[in-house]
Amino acid sequence: MEGETVIRNVTDIAIRVAACRTRRAVRHFSRSGFLSCVLAACLGVAGLPLAAWAQPAPDLGSEEQREAGRSLYMDKCAQCHGDAGQGDGVAAPFMRPMPRDFTAGVYKVRTTPSGQLPTDDDLARVIRDGMPYTGMPPWPQLSDDEIRNLVYYLKTFNADFSGPYGVPDLAEIPDPPSFSEASAERGRAVYEENQCFDCHGMAGRGDGSSAPTLQEQWGNHIRPADLTKRWTFIGGATRQDIYRTFTTGLDGSPMPSYSITPIEDSWALVDYVYSLSQDDPDYATAATARYAADPVDPAQGRAAFGEGRGAYFPVVGQVIESGRSFMPGVDGVEVKARYNADEIAIMLAWHDMSAETTGENAPDMAVPPTEQVVRDTVASVWSDAVAVQFPQEMAPEGLPYFLFGDAGQPVDLWFADLASGAGRSYVGRGSGNLIAGETDPSVHATYEDGEWTAVFAMPRDERFAEGAFVPIAFSVWDGFNDERGNRRGITGWYYLYIEPSERPSPVMPMLRAGGLTLLALLSIVGLMRFRRRTSVSA
């Protein structure tokens, strides 16, 4: 009879363990964990104390702490994640990626192996630091107690936190060795051997062949990370963060966990990814147009503007007027420019997951005010597009409204539909008041390795006088993201500096300044000597 009880208990535990692991990740169900459960059941039936064999109990907080966390959640989190934690808040349809469904118990950023729950510190870190370039903001204003209470409440959405897996294992994340160029070069080969380019692209810009079809666990499209923008990494931008991300994976997303051996190759991959970008975006406030006597050939693309990185400006969603784009497909644009006596040319470059070169686009297309972006794998009917705008006149009262100007201060808009490649000009007196301009710009655009490069060229007028700071702003439309008309990525006003064609020699100003300084010093010395002689005579 006792033997039958043991068998029933062991079988029951095995079924529950298998069900839980199947729900989370079958491949991470370890033999040692199963045998421990069987052994614990046998010892329990035999009357031996289980406390000596049991794992620490999950920390679920007190009822008062969970209630305090619930109040915080309803005030700050439910709008996106939903009252019941299912990721279905009123703002959820406008987010990309979608807010987390806490009831699934599946989390991307963890210091635990793939398939396991996060630790309390993992949850607290995401709350405090947010997830860059998603709808999840940081909450540094919350106290440690508030964050801890919020963590306790989040854990009530999934029963696994209070069960046998509520105390997860910690992944082994060693301290990183020193970075080296040789390691990064080896990492490029590791990157290719593991076919990371399928999602992230050969240049790491998130434009792999499978990128347009990727879906998260809940069936929503999700873009792979642009590895050339380290500051956008949701799990952190340090080399140790990158190591943790690919060794633990991003659960619920297409990003699996990788076990790469030997460990030197793991760090080589880290070094390669790290080498693709810089620490921060280094946003600019002005771009520079440099003089070149030769005519600008837009077909040369980036090569026509010299070496080096141009000015980089952040792109955000247009969320002010109807047609809003809360999560635009493009988050930054690089700008370079040159000019000669007759014309000015401006190069815009930005990363895009895919090139939408069919369909159409225009800055004055209507967008239904209630339309929500529901991206699937169906080809977009909207093409990619880009525009640059300037004030028609420099008015002493200030700048025009940055959303295509206003009635009192119109703007000139240079627009390029990247499906047709044709340039169009508009005069804007507001988003709802665009008319065709008199002269269309010439445009040449190319897409390669996840990057669009578009060159505008127009006759140079008095606004672009040497030494002038010309206000400039940009709009970018991502057709894959259903952007057109007022649904687009935008910038505010920045400046284009028209660098003088001839730089005056610094020699004469330096000599002048040196002479004046010497004269001042001699005058001071002479005055001090005069006062000394006068005092001695007295």
Image (tube, rainbow, N blue to C red):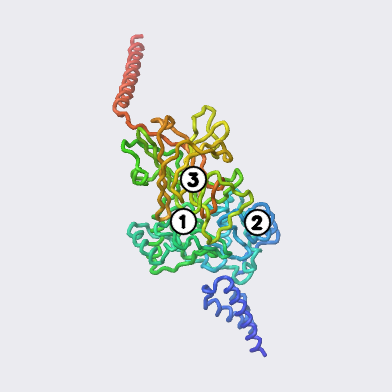
Camera-side mark, 1 or 2: 1
Q: What amino acid does circle 2 point to?
A: Gly
Q: Name the residue located 44 percent from the left edge and 48 percent from the top edge.
A: 421
Q: What amino acid does circle 3 point to?
A: Pro
- Say which residue label 3 marks: 314
The x and y percentages for residue 192 are 38, 64
- The numbered mark, 1 or 2, whose residue comes first in the sequence reads 2
Q: What amino acid does circle 1 point to?
A: Ser
The x and y percentages for residue 198 are 43, 63
Q: Quadrant of the N terminus?
A: bottom right
Residue at disc 3, secondary structure: strand
- The numbered mark, 3 or 2, whose residue comes first in the sequence reads 2
Image mark for residue 494: none
Crowding at label 1, few (<14), some or many (≥20) Cα neighbours within 10 Å?
many
- Say which residue label 1 marks: 354
Q: Name the residue located 42 percent from the left edge and 31 percent from the top edge.
A: 461
For the residues bearing labels 3 and 2, Cβ distance under 8 angstroms: no
The x and y percentages for residue 308 are 36, 45
- Say which residue label 2 marks: 89
Residue at disc 2, secondary structure: loop
Q: Quadrant of the C terminus?
A: top left
Which of 501 and 175 lies nearest the eye of the viewer? 501
| Alpha carbons under labels 3 and 1: distance apart | 20 Å
| Alpha carbons under labels 3 and 2: distance apart | 28 Å
Crowding at label 2, few (<14), some or many (≥20) Cα neighbours within 10 Å?
some
Which of 249 and 91 lies nearest the eye of the viewer? 91
Residue at disc 1, secondary structure: loop
Q: Name the residue located 37 percent from the left edge and 46 percent from the top edge.
A: 301
Which of 16 and 378 lies nearest the eye of the viewer? 378
- Above or below residue 76? Residue 244 is below
The x and y percentages for residue 128 are 57, 53
